[in-house]
Amino acid sequence: MIYQRVAFIGLGLIASSMAHAIRRAGLVGDMTGTARSARTRAVAAEIGLVDKVCETSAEAVRGADLVVLCVPVGAMAAVAAEIAPHLSHGATVTDVGSVKQAVIDAVTPHLPGHVHFIPGHPLAGTEHSGPESGFAELFDNRWCILTPQEGTDPGALDRLTQLWRGIGANVDLMDPPHHDLVLAVTSHTPHLIAYTMVGVADDLRRVTDSEVIKYSAAGFRDFTRIAASDPTMWRDVFLTNKDATLEILGRFTEELFALQRAIRRGDGDLLHDYFTRTRAIRRGIIEAGQDIDAPDFGRAKR
Ligand code: NAP
């Protein structure tokens, strides 16, 4: 047993996937959980997601030696303040938020000195939300980045690392600003671009009378999947990873203008060279085992 009791605050995609994966691996004594709405708590109880669904977060964290904050980044501070007085001595608190520095700033001031706070972010997800969207394989062979602060207890870090490895993930350590910059490139800015492209198509749809939907081709379809992601989660990502996202968006805009100019000038060589370079990145991702060579980005149909 890596932990005696794991408590999830928030019972959405990430918490439910962790719960399924933990059960698959038989890694903990028991699991508790709570969510904001009575509806989510009722669904979680009905499907037996955790051993005990609690009405309050205070009740959920009682006796837990690991507490996992699985709420949108903007809700982390309020949740930390709520659970703080009820945390067990020596417990580890971690989170799964998509931005790290903002979560550290929001959570740390509320936590008592007798707990270990080790922020984390599993690089795995889908566009689905809620307690029924989780599945045990979500983290298999994906990365989980932990961003421990100076002075973090090595034993606590080792246990949390073992848990993530036990549920299928590879673990890496990073400092929080670096995490936020890397994720701005690999996840946050691409989501914003997808949201924008689908917004543009939606405007056009009104002009073209549904042709955009009817003849939707692979490029656009892939964008719509990303742009179907949870609006609250993604609003919070951009509000809290502002600087890194703006930096990458600035670079993106410069590149876009360069390609726009090449199209205007008919500079086929530039376009061809550019697309050849980007193709190699895709090959690298497949070779690293982070996706399969399938047109749906390798996502299983669920
Ligand atoms: P989700 O499926 O939408 O679930 C969110 C959970 O948080 C729900 O149980 C919700 O309760 C609860 N919640 C929402 N707002 C709250 C508030 N203000 N106070 C208390 N509880 C609140 O979300 P998720 O995809 O699991 O994401 C959870 C975290 O993981 C986020 O921080 C996100 O950045 C991170 N993450 C997501 C992905 C992804 O692809 N989805 C990947 C990696 C990390 P109700 O259902 O009762 O509203």
Image (cartoon, rainbow, N blue to C red):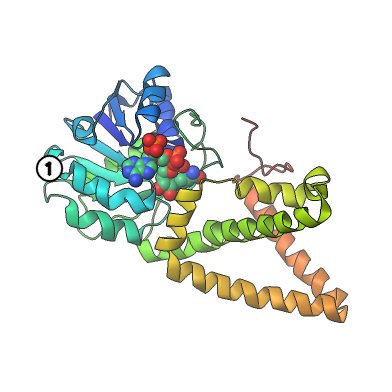
Residue matched to label 1? 85
Q: Residue at x 57, y 75 (%)?
A: 250
Q: Callout 1 environment at 10 Å: few (<14), some (14 to 19), or many (20+)?
A: some
Q: Quarter holding the C terminus?
A: top right
- Please report the residue visible at 31 percent of the width from the left and 35 percent of the height from the top: 8
Residue 180 picture quarter: bottom left
The answer to whether 204 appears left or right of 284 in the picture is: right
Residue drawn at (82%, 50%) of the image: 209
The one nearer the camera, 170 or 119, is 119
Quadrant in which residue 17 is drawn: top left
Q: Residue 165: tell me if it is visible.
A: no
Residue at the (30%, 30%) spot, across then down? 33
Q: Nearer the viewer, residue 153 or 226?
A: 226
Indicate whether 164 appears above or below 261: above
Residue 264 spot, x, y in % from top left = 84, 79
Q: Amino acid at mark 1?
A: Pro
Q: Is residue 139 left or right of residue 251?
A: left
Left or right? Give the position of 258 relative to 2.
Answer: right
In the rendering, at what x and y percent does residue 297 appear? 67, 44
